[in-house]
Image (tube, grey):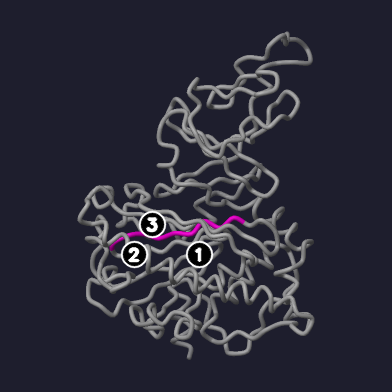
């Protein structure tokens, strides 16, 4: 047993839990008070996924990102950098932009109320009839910024004034999937799902395959449950992989690859599907031939939007003969997603019962237990097990 423990520690993992560890109490999925704590201590503090860099590729391109009560404008400035501005005019607090995406044709951002105008980098350019003096200075009225970091084409932002360095929170990601060259991949398809469940249930569902034989018969044929391994669990990043049964196969309706291997993917990675939770709102699934990811937006304790994207190499997307493979990958994951969403919504309903207090984890759900500990740590809550 000691040798097993050393093996897990070497891979950055806690030793697997024993059957019977307890889940979080039901209130963590339903309490408005706890949800508001999560917003303040997690969504307003952690680095969170915002969009793909390709969605704002040209100067003036922008996309609005909503993080609970905060609206942010992600925009490509004249230097080619991505800026994240709070969507608030410095004059009297008017929301500057209401369209979800577009391009600032004038290469500036203008308030619709009193025409205060800002450069794409947030500096105040013009304030009609305002005179610079002791109580007013353009320099002091620039748009408030959020912090931005781009990793492999994924744009992350942090609303914290002094966030933890991205490389610290996301240590496990740095260099992990460099062979995929994900910054070179492009969005081939997107499906939005509106779900009636807590955001944590989606992360939990994604990180265990205890449920796969009964819920996902096709997935279980393509990737046997017993092949599941967790290869990293540290901080905000938890992940692992499953082996493909078919040589050079993939997660598609017929199990065949949807496209040639992505960029420089080779060796064991040609036979693996990775599942990484990037806490708190990104689920990342690199395949040998494409990359799937989920962007989770919490709308309250019992509602989320889950935007699912399929990334392929541009030459595959532009190849008419490759469309059948892309379609097969989309259909497989749409089917699998809907199977997952149904049980997650049923769990949301069940955990609201007065007869549900806390559940029990199996030894195959050690990552879920780790996710719970991450949540309790972020909220500063005592571990319920230590108080029983």
| Total numbered circles | 3
Other-residue count near label 2 (Cα within 10 Å), few / some / many at <14 / 14–19 / ≥20? many
The Cα atoms of the two marked residues, 1 and 2, are separated by: 21 Å
Other-residue count near label 1 (Cα within 10 Å), few / some / many at <14 / 14–19 / ≥20? many
The Cα atoms of the two marked residues, 3 and 1, are separated by: 16 Å
Tell me where residue 84 appears, x and y as whole percent. 56, 37
Q: Is residue 86 magenta?
A: no
Q: Which of the two labelled residues, at mark 1 and mark 2, occupies the earlier sequence position?
A: 1
**Magenta residue span:** 289-297
Q: What element carries label 1?
A: strand
- Position of residue 87 relative to residue 373, above or below, is above
Circle nearer the viewer, 3 or 1? 3
Circle nearer the viewer, 1 or 2? 2
Is disc 3 in contact with disc 2, using a CB cutoff of under 8 Å? yes
Tell me where residue 334 appears, x and y as whole percent. 43, 66
Residue 310: assigned label: 3
Other-residue count near label 3 (Cα within 10 Å), few / some / many at <14 / 14–19 / ≥20? many
- Position of residue 297 relative to residue 231, above or below, is above
The Cα atoms of the two marked residues, 3 and 2, are separated by: 8 Å
Q: Mark 2 points at which residue?
A: 329
Tell me where residue 145 appears, x and y as whole percent. 61, 35
> Left or right of 227: which side holds 114?
right
> Left or right of 286: which side holds 38?
right
Q: Mark 1 points at which residue?
A: 277
Name the chief secondary structure element in magenta: strand
- Position of residue 367 relative to residue 38, above or below, is below
Is disc 3 in contact with disc 1, using a CB cutoff of under 8 Å? no
Q: Which of the two labelled residues, at mark 3 and mark 2, occupies the earlier sequence position?
A: 3
Residue at the (46%, 45%) spot, across then down:
150
Residue at the (43%, 56%) spot, across then down:
309
């Amino acid at each position: 047993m000691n040798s097993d423990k050393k093996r897990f520690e070497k891979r950055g993992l806690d030793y697997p839990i024993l059957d019977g560890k307890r889940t979080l109490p039901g209130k963590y999925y339903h309490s408005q008070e706890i949800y508001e704590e999560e917003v303040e201590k997690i969504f307003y503090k952690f680095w969170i996924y915002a969009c793909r860099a390709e969605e704002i590729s040209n100067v003036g391109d922008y996309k609005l990102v909503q993080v609970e009560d905060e609206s942010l404008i992600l925009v490509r400035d004249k230097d080619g950098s991505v800026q994240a501005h709070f969507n608030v005019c410095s004059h009297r607090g008017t929301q500057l932009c209401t369209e979800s995406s577009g391009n600032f044709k004038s290469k500036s951002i203008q308030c619709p109320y009193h025409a205060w105008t800002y450069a794409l980098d947030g500096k105040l350019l013009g304030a009609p009839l305002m005179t610079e003096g002791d109580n007013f200075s353009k320099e002091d009225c620039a748009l408030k910024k959020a912090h931005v970091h781009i990793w492999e084409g994924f744009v992350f932002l942090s609303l914290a004034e002094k966030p933890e360095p991205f490389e610290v929170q996301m240590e496990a990601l740095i260099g992990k999937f460099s062979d995929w060259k994900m910054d070179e991949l492009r969005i081939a398809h997107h499906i939005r799902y509106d779900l009636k469940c807590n955001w944590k249930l989606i992360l939990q569902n994604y990180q265990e395959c205890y449920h796969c034989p009964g819920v996902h018969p096709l997935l279980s044929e393509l990737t046997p449950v017993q092949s599941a391994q967790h290869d990293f669990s540290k901080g905000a990043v938890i992940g692992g992989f499953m082996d493909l049964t078919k040589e050079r196969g993939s997660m598609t309706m017929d199990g065949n690859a949807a496209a040639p291997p992505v960029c420089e993917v080779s060796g064991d990675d040609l036979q693996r599907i990775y599942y990484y939770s990037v806490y708190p709102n990104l689920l990342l699934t690199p395949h040998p031939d494409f990359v799937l990811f989920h962007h989770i937006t919490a709308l309250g304790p019992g509602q989320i939007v889950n935007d699912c994207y399929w990334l392929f190499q541009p030459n595959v997307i532009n190849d008419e003969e490759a469309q059948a493979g892309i379609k097969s990958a989309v259909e497989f994951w749409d089917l699998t997603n809907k199977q997952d969403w149904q049980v997650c919504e049923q769990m949301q309903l069940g955990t609201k019962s007065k007869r549900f207090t806390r559940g029990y984890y199996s030894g195959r759900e050690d990552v879920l237990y780790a996710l719970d500990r991450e949540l309790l740590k972020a909220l500063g809550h005592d571990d319920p097990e230590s108080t029983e």
